[in-house]
Every structure is written in structure tokens, then in C-alpha cells.
Image: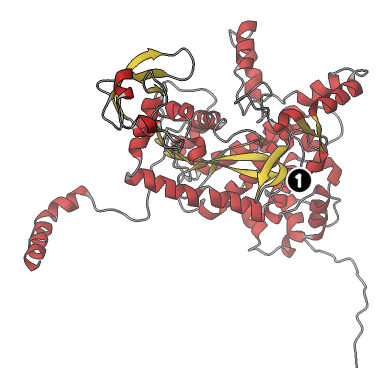
Amino acid sequence: MMGTKLRHFSPLANLSLEELVPNNNFYRRLDAMLDLSFVRDLVEDCYACLGRPSVDPMVFFRLQLVMFFEDIRSERQLMEVAADRLSVRWFLGYDLDEPLPDHSSLSRIRKRYGVEVFRRFFERIVEECFEAGLVWGEELFFDSTKVEANADVDSLRSRSIAENHLKELFEETGSQEIEDFDTPHLSPDALATDTLPMAGDESLKESNARSEGWISRKGRQERTFSSGPRKRTADRLLSTTDPDATPMRLGEGETKLGYQAYYVVDGGKARVVLNVLVTPSEVTENRPMLDLLWSSVFRWRIRSRRVTGDARYGTRRNVAALEKAGIRAYVAIPNFDFRDTGLFGPGHFRYDPEKDLYICPADQRLHRRARTSGNRGTQYRAKAEACNACELKARCTTSERGRMLYRAFEEDFYDRVRGYRGTFAYEKALRKRRVWVEPLFAEAKEWHGMRRFRLRRLEKVNMEALLIASGQNVKRLLAFGGRRPKKLAQAAALRLPSASGHQIGCAREHRSSYSWPTKAFFQQAGPFLIQGTQKRALLL
């Protein structure tokens, strides 16, 4: 006889959600490892003292972590999953009969907090990684990836027409709405600067505004910046869907609107992300590097010995800044000195630092002549009679005044980095970069929605990237957090608001799972090692 199931649900008495969630559930482990009570202090300034109670900030950030781990693309879908999953309800702290927050509240809360709160949330997760002993600090890796924007190329319009249209829309209401949109949410540290002795110096404020960094600008491009006579595409065209997204090349000549996401990753085994930034795709990778480096070094009080990146980061400005700071620049130098132009390039000439001259392929000397006032560097020229009588002149120069070279002002640091090539440490660092940072981008794109941003505008995509990086660090906390003892002195140093007068030991000792023999062992085993070497020599 075929049975028929009747759908009838009766209320269950004495039923607790605590009993319905298994003890080995992932969200139970996450709740036990990560204490999010600190977020209430982060957002305290965003709320008034009176009024209707809002959604608990802990619930909001727990929902953001659920969105990360479940790879959910919208707040509406997120709340549907939260209503359907008992484990998510338990993680949020809502009982079976309690109504969940509306999905529209999450968008309003995100807009209220601003990117500063999300960055401080990310930094607090990094602090947890420091306390768990997951950060080495002596080696940093830089890399970036292109991320598609939530806009289509067909939305591109003339920038001048679009800006004039926006000006006409707001000319009656004034610019107050635009100013409110661009006004940053100040952190307590930023508000504390008003009490400094030089806080009222207007000239100092103007100087600081002109030297605004990439992080303080939230990755926004300077429209006055120019890298050559050619006008950029982003200077002519503007997307009406996402004005901050710029055209970029993907795959085989395919053009998309997108952004550039930057990671600064620690060289320790846990691969903790120390800094994140998103810029329009038109920004070249090398420009934000120094701002990200100094921000990471001073924020986390680490003393890095090496910085590794690909050839896109190997500009003279970056290399000189790293080497001057005592940091080894393990970056690939672009090989422009041997370009095939029909004439000998600068790479075919040998520089003698003791005599301060160049030696050409025909063993003729190029002596220092003058130091230019521009960015070309110091001028070196060979004698005209020597060049005109040379057999290699057709391959060297077309000038009748002799071959001329320019040596850049920072070329000494470039030569120092060229000297790193072929060394074991340099080659190992470049090999390590390929398996250290790039898998993090692959993980974020394949499993956590970073292949295409779901939000629009530069400030919001920075929030999204910060949350993704925070989630990746939380995964490292879950995987490695219980394996190493906490370094309490370093954790206390990170939490102190004021700098101390003594020198801070910043980078934790990087321990390997293999314990190497001590010096005393080799001293005791010396005679045996010598005898073994002599025996092998006799056998050979």
C-alpha cells in the first residue's frame, strides 16, 4: 500500500536552537575563535544617544562574514539564507521565533559606517593574527589583480558631457549633497589631531592636503596626474553606471570596466594580508606601492628586511625608496637598456663607479659632462674624433658630436638591485611570490566573489575588498590560530595608543617545524665529520 505524507506542523515545546545546531558546526567554531564585541567601540560615534535601537553592530558584521563564507552576492539573498539556515540563525543570535533584520537595513548601515570603519575592522582582525603569532614581518610581498566592476562598457559617455549634466542637476540644490557624499567618516584618532599644538596652522593643513596619500584618498586617481603627452581614456570617457570604474584590458583584447585591487601579504607561513587598497584600473601598479608599504610598516610596527614584487613595481622611485630605508628590493628590473632599436642601448656600456665614467663596446670612455636640471640625470659623452673614427659607429650613434648617455640620479640603487640577480635569496623570493600572493587572489575570485565587485563607486568597492581580506585572515586564524603561542608583548605594543620611548622589537621570530642542530653539536661532531670526509676521499 502506498503511503501519503500529510503536511502538518505543530508547535514544539521546550525546543532550543542551541540543541538543533551540531557541536561540530563551522559557525560554532568560528564563534568560539573570534570575539566581535570590539565592533561596538568602532561604531560608537556613528549612533546617537537617544532614539530607536538599531541593528546590533555585531550582527551586521556577523552577516558580512556569512556573506563571505557562503559566497553570497546580495543582501536580499543573504537574509533568505539566514532565515533558512539554523546554524546561521544561531551564529547571529536570533531565536526561531525572532524576526531577522530587513535586507535594506544592511545597505543603510554600510553607508553610515563608511570605509574608515571597515578598515578599522580589517586592522583589528590583523591584530588578532599578530596576537596568535601568525605574522612574521621580516618579508613583505606586493601584488595586484584586476577586478571587474558592476558596470558595462556600453555605459561610457563623454566625461565633459556627463560632468556638465551633473552640474545642471545640482545647481539648484547647491553642492551640499555632493559634499556630504565625499565627507569622510573621521576616526577617533583623526579627531584627536584637533588638540595638537599645530592644529590651527592653515599652511600646514594645505601642505598635508597636497601630500594626501592613496589610502587617505581611498584609492582615488588624481585627474591632474599625467604620465606623458597622450591623453588617458578615463580623462575622455566616464561611466554613468559607475563613474569611478575605468576601462581595462582582460583576456585577448577584451575591454571591461574595472578596478585594481592591491594586497600586501606577510611572508610568514600563514600568509596574512596586512594591507588592502582598491584603485581605478587606470592607476599603474607601481604608484600606490610606497604608501601601502609605509602604512603597513608604521601601523604594525614591523621592521621588514625584504620586499618582493614583479617587474611592474621595479621603478627607480620605488627601488631607491626601499634601498634608502635599508630594505632589500627583490623586484624584477625592467630590461629597457637592451631594447632593439638598431643602436647600442645603455646596457651595452659598462659603468666604472671609481672613475665615474662609461666604457663603450669599443673600449672608448664617456666622461661626465654636466648634470641636467630635469629628470634625465647626469650626462656622459665620448669624444667626437674617437666616435667618428670608430668602426662600430653605425651601430652606436648617428651624431657627429660623439655618443651621449644619461645616467639617472637613482641609478646606483638600480645597480645594487641588479647585483641581487642570481643570488639564492633573490631567486627564492621571486619563486615564493608566485605561490604566496597569487593563490590568495585566486581564492578570493573563485570562492568569495572577487572576480566581479557587486557594489559600485570606489568607496564601496574598498569596503568590499576589506571585508574579503578580513575573511581570508579569519580563515588563517581558524587554520593556524591554535598552533602557536601568543606573543603577549607584541600584542600589548599593538594595542597601546601612544608610542613608547624605548625601541620596540617588532617582528616575531619565524620558527620552522624542523629544529636545526646547534653550534655545540657541530663542534662535538667535528672530528667525525673530518674522518668521514677523508674516508670518502680515499674511496674516490
Does residue 151 show up?
no
Q: Is residue 45 above or below residue 473?
A: above
Does residue 300 show up?
yes
Residue drawn at (65%, 13%), measured in percent from left and top? Answer: 194
Residue drawn at (43%, 50%), measured in percent from left and top? Answer: 431
Q: Is residue 461 left or right of residue 165?
A: left
Q: Nearer the viewer, residue 135 or 336?
A: 336
Residue 251 at x, y percent in the picture: 65, 51
Q: Quadrant of the N terminus?
A: bottom right
- Characterize the local packing of mark 1: few (<14), some (14-19) or many (20 or more) Cα atoms within 10 angstroms: some
Number of numbered discs visible in the structure rendering: 1
Residue 186 at x, y percent in the picture: 69, 24
Q: Is residue 198 above or below residue 511?
A: above
Task: Work out which residue is located at the far bottom of the displayed protein and give it.
Answer: 1
Under circle 1, the secondary element is: loop
Q: Is residue 317 left or right of residue 196?
A: left
Residue 241 at x, y percent in the picture: 82, 38
Q: Nearer the viewer, residue 391 or 56?
A: 391
Quarter residue 97 falls in: bottom right
Q: Is residue 204 left or right of residue 482?
A: right
Q: Quadrant of the C terminus?
A: bottom left
Residue 119 at x, y percent in the picture: 64, 35
Residue marked by disc 1:
454
Quarter residue 235 falls in: top right
What colour scheme was applied to this rendering of the protein?
secondary structure
Q: Is residue 453 above or below residue 370?
A: below
Q: Is residue 343 above or below residue 485?
A: above
Residue type at the position of mark 1: Arg
Q: Nearer the viewer, residue 448 or 185?
A: 448
